């Protein structure tokens, strides 16, 4: 699969989290938020560079880089703007 073009990468929708009443509710809300994050896996240095350029242009505050899936993160930052796997 080719790297996504800059035009294909979209800004994140704003997601408001309600005040959780317990940890299970908080976890469900966080997973719902993460499911709306763009998840990309650049396969080339040029694709990765273009992705970081876009992140800088969009002023994304946090990018999580790692392996696995959106459900496989140990403890990511509270509100990442993009997950890179």
Image (cartoon, rainbow, N blue to C red):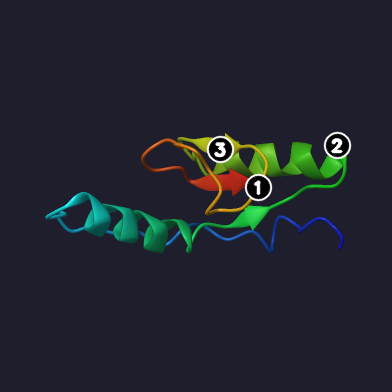
Q: Is 33 displayed left or right of 63 in the figure?
A: left
Secondary structure of the residue carrying numbered label 1? loop
Q: Distance between the residues labelled 3 and 2?
A: 17 Å
Callouts 2 and 1 close, C-beta under 8 Å: no
Q: What numbered label is drawn on residue 45?
A: 2
Closer to the eye: label 3 or 1: 1
Q: Quadrant of the N terminus?
A: bottom right
Which of marks 1 and 2 precedes in the sequence?
2
The image shows residue 31, relative to residue 75, as above or below, that is below
The image quarter containing residue 77 is top left
Q: Residues within 10 Å of mark 3 (few under 14, many from 20)?
A: some
Q: Is 47 displayed left or right of 62 in the figure?
A: right
Secondary structure of the residue carrying numbered label 2? helix
Which of marks 2 and 3 precedes in the sequence?
2
Q: What numbered label is drawn on residue 47?
A: none
Q: Where is residue 15 in the image (x, y as percent from the top left)?
A: 33, 60
Q: Position of residue 20 (x, y in %)?
A: 16, 54
Secondary structure of the residue carrying numbered label 3? strand
Residue wearing tag 3? 64
Q: Is 7 displayed left or right of 27 in the figure?
A: right
Front residue (pair 33, 81) = 33
Closer to the eye: label 2 or 1: 1
Q: Position of residue 80 (x, y in %)?
A: 45, 42
Q: How far apart are marks 2 and 1 (CA)?
A: 20 Å
Q: Residues within 10 Å of mark 1 (few under 14, many from 20)?
A: few
Front residue (pair 46, 34) = 34
Callouts 3 and 1 close, C-beta under 8 Å: no
Residue wearing tag 1? 68
């Amino acid at each position: 699969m080719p790297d996504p073009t800059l035009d294909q990468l979209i800004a994140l929708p704003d997601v408001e989290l309600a005040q959780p009443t317990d940890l299970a509710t908080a976890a469900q809300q966080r997973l719902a938020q993460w499911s709306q994050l763009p998840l990309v896996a650049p396969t080339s240095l040029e694709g990765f560079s273009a992705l970081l350029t876009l992140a800088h242009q969009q002023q994304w505050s946090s990018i999580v880089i790692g392996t696995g899936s959106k459900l496989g993160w140990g403890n990511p930052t509270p509100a990442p703007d993009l997950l890179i796997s």
